[in-house]
Image (cartoon, grey):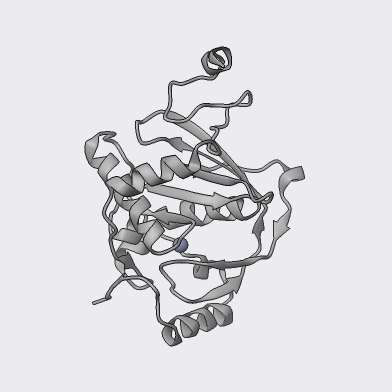
Amino acid sequence: MAQQETEKQHAGVLPVDDEGFVIDTEDCEAREAAYRERGTSRPITVVGNPVLHKECKDVTEFGPELEKLVDDMFASQRTAEGVGLAANQIGVDLKVFVYDCPDDEGVRHTGVVCNPVLQELPADRRRLDDSNEGCLSVPTAYAELARPDYAVVTGRDEKGNEITVRGTGYFARCLQHETDHLYGYLYIDRLSKRERKNALKQMEEGTPRYATVPNE
Ligand SMILES: [Zn+2]
């Protein structure tokens, strides 16, 4: 199918569809494994670590160092059994997140976004979904949090190409959650005081199944 292959734009790491969104649903298994196998799993920072509570720096250099970081992020994400991971969750102050997450139809999406910016949604796409949310940086805790069930994020891939990613359902939640991380916000910052307290209590009582970075 060489014809179809040339019709897709291959300027970026991933092909792009007719509407300009990256196609991040193809070869997920192989792509995720390739990143992860090159990378080294690192321990996860947890709530209270300063790197999680401030805006990260923009990525300005798209080279081997960034690629190594992305590999390590995929390795760490797999070890911690996450569906998304932001760079500050392994202690790196840079606007990068990776994801490996199913959407509302159970379709798997795998990719990398640097310098993400969440786009305003048209009014007709702003439907809230109040599913459960959790975070590797708030281990063992979960809380219901209402978020739009559709999200569009613009940014760059790990080679510096401009990309637009869109997601539905759980993947929409993931895109919003990971972008929040890179601006210094955890999902518990969006909860009521009481729900936040409850999430922190769940965390205190639980034991993470992966290595974490102890807070000072
Ligand atoms: Zn998180």
| Whole-percent x, y for residue 159 in the image | 34, 31
Residue placed most toward the observer, 169 or 116: 169
| Whole-percent x, y for residue 47 in the image | 38, 72
x 47%, y 76%: residue: 140
State whether residue 206 is above or below residue 138: below
Q: Quadrant of residue 138?
A: bottom left
Left-right relation of 163 to 53? right
**Would residue 169 be visible to someone looking at this image?**
yes
Left-right relation of 49 to 190? left
Farthest-out residue, front: 1
Left-right relation of 201 to 148? left
State whether residue 115 is above or below residue 9: below
x 43%, y 66%: residue: 136
Residue placed most toward the observer, 77 or 194: 77
**Would residue 94 be visible to someone looking at this image?**
no
Which quarter of the figure is the N terminus placed in? top right
| Whole-percent x, y for residue 103 in the image | 63, 50
State whether residue 198 is above or below residue 132: below
Residue placed most toward the observer, 120 or 64: 64
x 53%, y 18%: residue: 5
Left-right relation of 44 to 168? left
State whether residue 62 is above or below residue 205: above
Q: How many marks?
A: 0
x 57%, y 12%: residue: 3
Which quarter of the figure is the C terminus placed in? bottom left
